Image: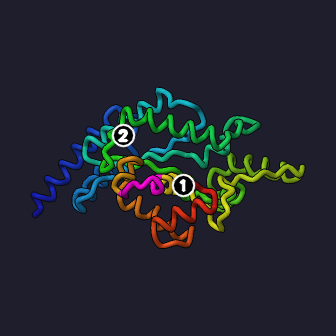
Amino acid sequence: MPKRADAAAKEAAEQARSLAGHAVDSLPGGALADKIKSARAEERPLRVKLGIDPTAPDIHLGHAVVLRKLREFQDAGHRVVLIIGDYTARVGDPSGRSTLRPMLSEQEIEDNAGTFQEQALRILDRDPERLEVRRNGEWLDMPMAELLSAAAAHGRMPDSIGKLLAVFEAEKGQGEEKSYRPSTQPLIEPLSPRELEVLHLMAQGLSNQEMCERLFLALSTVKGHNRKIFGKLQVQRRTEAVARARELGLL
């Protein structure tokens, strides 16, 4: 048994060294090897995440470098989670600036997100077992000022968040407060952008497996979206969900 454990630790360390190749740092030291060893013991792949905010029409060369590294993780048997920051793109990064970057329209963000995903998939393996594409609008479903206040309460990036909150307060004082909710749906709890995407595919008659292949999601993730859609629309079946969505003008 000790020999088997030693062999597993050695293999994990070798893979970690390979995956960390050409990286400036891999911190904390030894953590990647430990995670690989634990994942192998549990017979599961690592989940390696990258988030990109679609604030411009195209990804740049710097993104390609990171995407190549993610492809190495995929080729080593691990699963990549590409997170498109469709929600966070609605607020510009104020770092090093006295004003926010221009806020994009939902259509601009959606167009950029589609381009980002298309370009990223020229490098990443499209196999749903190796790739999961998510949008942070799936879980950041709250007014932006509320989200920033919650982040500030936990001490996250105090300088940047302080600047953003100051902008919200200034606009409120001038009577120009805007709504930063991503949806004006006639629901108590609106569908997220990803849930709307699943709903449209549902209306087209695609099976769960076909949705997985179209959206590069795991089957369990698609089923989870279905459950949330049914709950928010207060229905129990696909046909009822589609009919209810059409009544509400969501399709």
Asked if residue 203 is among those painted magenta in the image, a careful observer would answer yes
* Foreground: disc 1 or disc 2: 1
Q: Which of the 4 quarters of the picture holds residue 237?
A: bottom left
> Residue 105 appears at what percent x and percent y?
67, 41
Residue 127 sits above or below residue 60 on the image: below
Does dot 1 land on a helix, a strand or a loop? helix
**Distance Cα–Cα, label 1 vs label 2:** 28 Å
Image location (x, y in percent) of residue 210: 35, 52
**Marks 1 & 2, CB-CB < 8 Å contact:** no
> Which structural element holds mark 2?
helix
Percent coordinates x, y for residue 212 in the rendering:
37, 52
Look at the image and give the residue range highlighted in magenta. 201-208
Looking at the rendering, in which quadrant would you find the C terminus?
bottom right
Residue nearest the observer in this picture, 240 or 51: 240
Residue 230: % across, % down: 50, 68
- Which residue type does callout 1 highlight? Leu
Going by the numbered disc 2, the residue's amino acid type is: Leu
Q: Which residue in the structure is indicated by mark 2?
A: 70
* Residue at 10 percent of width and 58 percent of height: 3
Mark 1 or 2, nearer chain start: 2
Q: Which residue is mark 1?
A: 196
